Structure formats: structure tokens, C-alpha cells
Image (cartoon, coloured by chain):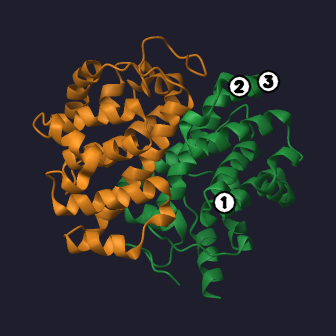
Amino acid sequence: MPHIEFQSGLQGIRGPLAFRPETAKPLNELADALLHAPNSLSAGERELIATYVSYLNDCYFCQTVHGAIAAVHLNGDEELVKCVKADFAHADISPKLKTLLVIAGKVQRSGKNVTPEDVAAARAEGATDVEIHDTVLIAAAFCMFNRYVDGLATWQPQEEALYRERAKKTARDGYALASRDYIPQLKEA
Amino acid sequence: MILPHIQLPPELPGISAAMAFRKETAQPLRELAHVLLHEPNSLTPGERELIATYVSSLNGCQFCQASHGAAAACHLGNSEFVRQVKVSPDTAPISAKLKRLLGIAAQIQRGGKYVSSEDIAAARSEGATDMEIHDTVLIAAAFCMYNRYVDGLATIQPEADEAYIDMGRHLAKHGYIQSSQTSIAAITNSEIE
């Protein structure tokens, strides 16, 4: 049972987002700016960072949703998503993304754990300041989203198929647009 | 002095520098803080700033705990309360309800799964509403983001809490949508001195 009363049938973060449209708006806009807007990091790469941090925080809903969205962006390669979670150092991803995942893993524990050496390693693989910034903020933001979803004990059905369907729409339309299906108050915005 | 990890505007401290660097993410980050901490709510702005300050203090983020602590002190007209909440919320002179909400916030700081049904029931028995519990969880979660953002980029963070008084006053009065150049300059100048 969720800790507070949500509209029934809404999974994971959708319960609290619909409960409080005033905070849903900036939360969706933040997710869009970080994960969906054009960026020198591909949407698939950014979703992998979100998935990895959610996995480290052990948030079932977030790692499954964002893992499914990452797979949509990566030509359906769910195996790659699993590899990144289990052992990204040996996954078939770019050396640059590996160094960014190291930074994301540090941020997951604490911002203070990121060292100048971590950042230098990312730069040596070609990471730009914006890419390093966005990696830090994606990782930090998922330390928020994961806590929001788990801290209210939201409904997180353990059925991956449910997440695959939803992922296609979010991967195509982004977060703010997809949320209008279940937050009618955001339609006029 | 440790330099920020990326090239941020050198005249700006803490999150102000990161927000100036990336305006696309600054807008929703500001709006989220404004709704959670400044807009009308059954929890007072002072109470909500105390939750933000307490979580930032648990995360050891100097910029956030000092700036939100200064905003809380301004709302409450008392900086001693703020210090007591950081050191020992259980014995601080605050309402029983706020103590329960700070208990939930502390669990969130460790991880969302630490919040128990008992924590929620305890807050409810002191009169906390669903909206207040929701906002407490999201304020605590959001500061687990803001703190990591500020520290993860190694932004400039003056050590003296006094340097943040002007900024706290601005935040308490105007909220989070507009930044204040003069109150930010006060923090930067304290660092140079």
C-alpha cells in the first residue's frame, strides 16, 4: 500500500505526479531537458545513465521504465541495458560513456565523491563540460526521483511488459507530453 | 581552493554557478524549489526551509545548508532554532508534527525505502496531512538532488554561514524564480576577503 492515497491504477511516479500537478510540471520539464531534448549525448546514452543510477538506488520502477526507454532508443537492445547495470566496464558502450557512468556512480553515493581524476578521465575520452554537467545532474536527479517513488511506497508492478508499452510512447513524445494522459491539469499548460 | 570540475562563471557560488552554466535545466530546478518552499502551503515557509536545511546538513552540503538555513532563520526570525534543528531535531523548539516530518526526511536522505508505515502513522497522529507528507518526501528527495548537484560539480562554497545571510533574506522574500545578483555578490565577496 502506498503511504498516501493516490488515484488508483497509476504506477510508480505517476501516482505522486497526478497527486500534485504543481510539482509534476517542473519535474517533467527537468526530465525532458535532461533526457529528451537534443544533446551531444544520445537519448539512449542519457537513459542508460538514469537506469544505472536507479539500479544502484534499487528503485524497481525507475530502473525498469528508464531501462525500457533506453532499449527503445538503442534499437531494442535490452541485453545491452542489462549489461550496463550488471557490469558497464565490460558492456558494448563507448569509453566516454564508461567514464561518465563512473561519475554517475560517485554522485549516487555523494556529490563529494567525484574527484578531479574522474573528471579528467571523462575529458580524456572527449567528454565536454556540458556532458559532464548533464551526467552529474542526471545522476543527482535520479537520486531524487528514486527517493520520491520509493519514499511514498508507490505501486510498482513487477511485470516488465507493462513498462515496454509505455516506454515507446515516452521515448517518442518525451515526459511532459506523455504525462498529460494522466494529469489532466497539465493539458492547458 | 579547489576549482569547480567544469568551467563555471567564476563570480558565482554554489548552485547559482551551475544554473548560469545551463539555463535549460535551471528553469525547472528553480520552479520546483519555488513550489516546494515558497508558494502557499499548510506548512509554513520556515518549516519547509528547515526540512531543506536539515537534509542538506545530513548530506554535508555547505552551500545548501547555509543558504536555506539563512532563509529559514529569516522566516522564523531566529537563527538559533535553525542550529538546534541541525544538531538535534528531537529537542529543538519546534512542533511535534514537524519533528515527525523531519524524521521522515531523514529516512529519505538515506533512501526512499527506509520510510516505514510507522513513520507515516506517527506523522499522521500529530496531524500531518497527505499533502504535507508528500511535500516532505519530495523536499527531502529534491535536496538529495540539489546537494549532489552542488557538490558533484565542486562549486565554490564559502565556509562561513554568515556569508549567506543576504541570500537567505532574498530567498525568504522573493523565492526561487529570480536570482539576486547583489545577494550572490555578497557571498562571492566574502570568499575573496
* Circles 3 and 1 on the same subunit: yes
Residue A126 % position (x, y): 19, 70
Q: Which residue is mark 3?
A: B127
Drawn side of residue B171 relative to residue A65, left or right:
right
Q: Secondary structure at mark 1?
A: helix
Give the mark nearer the N terminus: 2 vs 3. Answer: 2
Q: Which residue is mark 1?
A: B65
Residue B13 % position (x, y): 54, 71
Residue A178 % position (x, y): 30, 27
Q: Residues within 10 Å of mark 2 (few under 14, many from 20)?
A: few
Chain at tag 1: B
- Residue found farthest to the bottom: B193
Eye-nearest disc, 2 or 3: 2
Q: Which residue is mark 2?
A: B118
Give the green chain's letter: B
Image quadrant where one finds the C terminus of chain B:
bottom right
Q: Secondary structure at mark 3?
A: loop
Q: Give the spatial CA distance, label 1 vs label 2.
A: 28 Å
Q: Amino acid at mark 2?
A: Glu
Residue at position x 33%, y 60% from top? Answer: A102
Q: Amino acid at mark 1?
A: Gln
Q: Give the spatial CA distance, label 2 vs label 3.
A: 14 Å
Chain at tag 2: B
